[in-house]
């Protein structure tokens, strides 16, 4: 539980898509609706080298299959899974978005990420900060020499790639 809830990480907390006012909207020329785009953005594995909030941008022209590698970042932010699919955009269409990335621990629902002073059309996003995706352990009897009164502990840790499992432990 501690590995899943207490390790710090980075995640997208809000997104502002040009021409979109709410999450049930659509973007002309984009196959996915805004809700699906947000779900795909929540799958980003983001590594932040600073504690402050940072802004990342996405500006693409169609036709294209847009992935996380198309996101424009500065040296303080790294997208660890650049092949992560975001959406498909048709020929002649364009898509501009600004996303806010912050660092924290655990899970923060979209309601807590909402800011009263945010521009109209800014959509708060559920943020899953933990870099650990799965933890499993197994205890087996072990033998050392002629003494069989020992246990062997095997721990399996799966991360999103922003940290290595050894660092999580």
Image: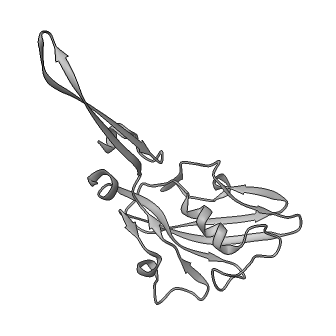
Q: Residue at x 62, y 66 (%)?
A: 57
Q: Position of residue 51 (x, y in %)?
A: 37, 63
Please state if 154 lies on the left or on the right of 36 as rendered: left
Q: Quadrant of the N terminus?
A: bottom left
Residue 6 is left or right of residue 96, and the answer is left
Locate residue 87, reporting x and y percent.
72, 61
For residue 146, side relative to residue 119 (left or right) = left
Above or below 107: residue 134: above
Residue at image x 39%, y 56%? 130
* Residue 24 lies in quadrant: bottom right
Taking depth in this image into account, of 65 and 144 the one nearest to the observer is 144
**38 relative to 168, above or below:** below
Which of 150 and 100 lies nearest the eye of the viewer? 150
User: Of 18 and 75, which appears nearest the observer?
Assistant: 18
Q: Position of residue 131 (x, y in %)?
A: 41, 52
Q: How is the image coloured?
A: one colour
Residue drawn at the location 36% of the way across and 62% of the way down: 106
Can you give x and y, in whole percent of width and height, for residue 21 in the image? 66, 86
Q: Eyeballing the image, is 79 above or below 138?
A: below
């Amino acid at each position: 539980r501690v590995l899943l809830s207490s390790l710090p990480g980075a995640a997208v907390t809000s997104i502002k898509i040009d021409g979109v006012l709410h999450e049930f909207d659509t973007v002309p020329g984009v196959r996915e609706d805004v809700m699906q785009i947000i779900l795909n953005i929540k799958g980003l594995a983001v590594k932040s080298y600073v504690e402050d909030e940072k802004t990342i941008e996405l500006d693409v022209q169609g036709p294209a299959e847009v992935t996380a590698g198309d996101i424009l970042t500065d040296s303080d932010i790294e997208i660890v899974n650049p092949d992560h699919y975001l959406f498909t955009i048709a020929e002649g269409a364009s898509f501009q978005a600004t996303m806010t990335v912050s660092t924290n621990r655990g899970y923060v629902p979209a309601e807590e990420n909402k800011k009263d002073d945010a521009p109209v059309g800014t959509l708060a996003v559920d943020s899953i900060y933990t870099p650990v995706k799965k933890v499993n352990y197994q205890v087996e009897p072990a033998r050392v020499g002629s003494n069989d009164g020992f246990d062997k502990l095997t721990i399996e840790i799966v991360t999103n790639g922003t940290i290595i499992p050894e660092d999580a432990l």
